[in-house]
Image (cartoon, rainbow, N blue to C red):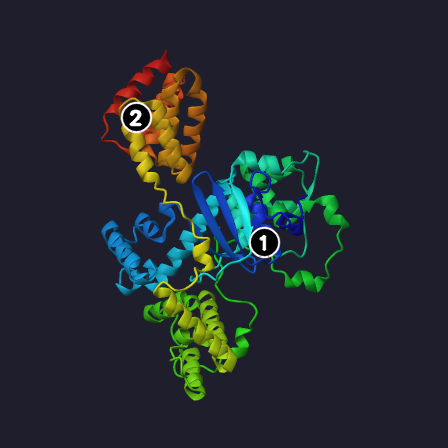
């Protein structure tokens, strides 16, 4: 049905129009690649770092995707505090997240959750970059952050919510008489209620029309999810499933079936090459409470920073540390954040991730040659600060384009719209949507498109507006523009309904009352 992962990754660069982002993600996960995926489309750029096939970092030149702006947008940080922290971060070269924790503006626990959400937003946005070029870069530096995403969950959510529908139909073609079936013995992502309903319907080996009938989903929703399931290897054509060797009962039992749950669940930042249970010393004293905010914040604070620290800093020991002192420092840290102290799976996993980091640091400093190598690296880092070091891989591949701000383009477009420069307004609204496809920006873009040529753009503008209000029913401007365009197209009943929706959202605007009354008269005629 699709190219094999090895075939997909044979091409080091290409176009997402030919090799969709979801296919690349799946191939990198299956092949467990450690690399950087670079995406470019016009002035927009992103670089996604993968470790063992999982996305662990994403940088972009879109201002609204930076952590600080994201926190402001989510109401977790004021604009004034963001500007102060940003200036200090640039001056001190301390990451803005660490500064915010130091200043008490956000807790480590909340910061980690927001970093997960921020990274998810940046990655999901890539599903709409269908006209981008991609390049795979093998030479990378480990990221400083400890966020790790579940690729299967990302693919399901991205295809179901972000990927343009025409791209789905382009890359997923079959005839209505083909039957689909679940592939036994394959572990899948967590499923929402809607996803689970469709997946359960596939037990009956339906055709696509039968699948729609059984699941109760419309064509758009059903086709998107079916595409994702097939790409993830959970579903295939029934005849292809029959050709496969049947898994043994024990193998099937070992594979947990997809369960209902969140639409997007980031994975913990643990490294699977070390068995944490073999490293856990017996926890002494009373077990920590999972509900203790101080304990959770201490754990998350250590977890967030551990990847950016070298073995000396991670264990809190000097460069001339002696074996006995090194061992004591290691045991103290493993006891402080022992996984045995936590019951919640999420906290346990982070404690295990820390334990792996501590064990690797202890192992490195216990070896004479490794410890000497780390001392040389620290000396090189000190030299680099005074301008004598070689640029790091990260610096060599750093995005050089200035940060792109959608709100600036939007404000310029509003000015042009007010001046009745509709073509100029459309250009800037489109640029704002290109950077950040907010419903408000898309509504104004459709309105500017209509005003440019009402006689020929009415149908397309109305279609765009109806898509916006379907996605964001609370967008007053979209309902108002829908009413105006419907009125221009002579669809009076639809115009009346749109004006009523706008009035319900903003009853103080009496203009809507006059418009509703006028359209009611037109409908009666």
Asked whether disc 1 touches disc 2, contact meaning CB atoms under 8 Å apart, the reply is no
Q: Quadrant of the N terminus?
A: top right
- State the image quarter where residue 389 is shown: bottom left
Residue at the far front: name it: 388
Give the camera-side residue of 326 and 461. 326
- From the image, tell me which residue sits under label 2: 417
- State the image quarter where residue 294 is shown: bottom left
Image height check: is 157 above or below 220? Answer: below
Q: CA distance from mark 1 to mark 2?
A: 45 Å
Q: Name which residue lies at 28% across and 65% down.
A: 102
Q: Does residue 200 appear to the left or right of 360 in the view shown?
A: right
- Can residue 525 be seen in this snapshot? yes
Instruction: Point out the tag, 1 or 2, that comes first from the N-terminus.
Output: 1
- From the image, tell me which residue sits under label 1: 28
Q: Name which residue lies at 42% across and 20% down.
A: 458
In the rendering, at what x and y percent does residue 245 appear? 76, 55
Give the camera-side residue of 503 and 298. 298
Residue at the far bottom: name it: 324
In the rendering, at what x and y percent does residue 439 appear? 38, 36
């Amino acid at each position: 049905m699709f190219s094999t992962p090895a075939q997909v990754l044979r091409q080091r660069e290409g176009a997402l129009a030919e090799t969709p982002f979801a296919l690349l993600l799946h191939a990198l996960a299956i092949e467990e690649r450690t690399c950087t995926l670079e995406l470019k489309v016009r002035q927009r750029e992103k670089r996604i770092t993968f470790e063992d096939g999982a996305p662990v970092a994403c940088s972009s030149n879109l201002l609204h995707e930076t952590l600080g702006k994201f926190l402001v947008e989510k109401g977790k940080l004021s604009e004034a505090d963001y500007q102060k922290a940003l200036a200090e971060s640039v001056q001190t070269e301390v990451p803005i997240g660490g500064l915010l924790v130091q200043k008490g503006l956000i807790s480590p626990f909340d910061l980690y959750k927001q970093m997960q959400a921020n990274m998810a937003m940046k990655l999901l946005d890539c599903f709409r970059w269908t006209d981008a070029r991609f390049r795979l870069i093998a030479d990378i530096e480990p990221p400083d952050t400890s966020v790790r995403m579940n690729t299967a969950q990302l693919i399901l959510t991205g295809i179901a919510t972000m990927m343009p529908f025409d791209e789905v139909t382009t890359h997923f073609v079959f005839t209505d008489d083909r039957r689909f079936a679940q592939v036994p013995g394959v572990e899948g992502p967590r499923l929402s209620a809607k996803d689970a309903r469709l997946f359960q319907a596939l037990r009956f080996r339906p055709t696509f029309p039968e699948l729609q009938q059984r699941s109760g989903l419309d064509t758009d929703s059903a086709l998107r999810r079916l595409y994702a399931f097939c790409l993830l290897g959970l579903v295939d054509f029934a005849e292809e499933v029959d050709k496969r060797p049947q898994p043994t009962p024990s193998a099937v039992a070992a594979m947990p079936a997809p369960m209902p749950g969140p639409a997007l669940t980031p994975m913990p930042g643990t490294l699977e090459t070390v068995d944490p249970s073999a490293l856990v010393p017996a926890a002494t004293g009373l077990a920590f409470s999972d509900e203790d905010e101080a304990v959770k914040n201490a754990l998350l604070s250590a977890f967030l920073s551990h990847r950016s620290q070298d073995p000396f800093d991670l264990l809190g020991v000097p460069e001339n540390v002696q074996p006995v002192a090194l061992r004591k420092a290691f045991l103290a840290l493993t006891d402080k954040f022992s996984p045995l102290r936590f019951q919640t799976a999420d906290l346990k996993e982070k404690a295990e991730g820390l334990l792996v980091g501590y064990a690797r640091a202890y192992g490195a400093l216990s070896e004479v040659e490794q410890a000497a190598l780390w001392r040389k690296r620290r000396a090189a880092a000190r030299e680099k600060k005074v301008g004598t070091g070689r640029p790091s891989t990260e610096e060599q591949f750093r995005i050089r384009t200035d940060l792109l701000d959608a709100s600036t383009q939007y404000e310029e477009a509003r000015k042009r719209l007010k001046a009745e420069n509709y073509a100029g307004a459309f250009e800037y609204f489109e640029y704002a949507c290109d950077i950040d496809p907010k419903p408000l920006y898309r509504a104004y873009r459709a309105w500017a498109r209509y005003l440019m040529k009402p006689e020929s753009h009415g149908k397309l503008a109305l279609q765009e507006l109806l898509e916006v209000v379907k996605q964001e029913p609370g967008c007053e401007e979209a309902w108002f523009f829908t009413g105006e365009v419907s009125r221009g197209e002579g669809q009076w009943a639809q115009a009346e309904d749109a004006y009523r929706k706008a009035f319900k959202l903003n009853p103080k605007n009496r203009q809507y009352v006059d418009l509703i009354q006028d359209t009611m008269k037109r409908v009666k005629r």
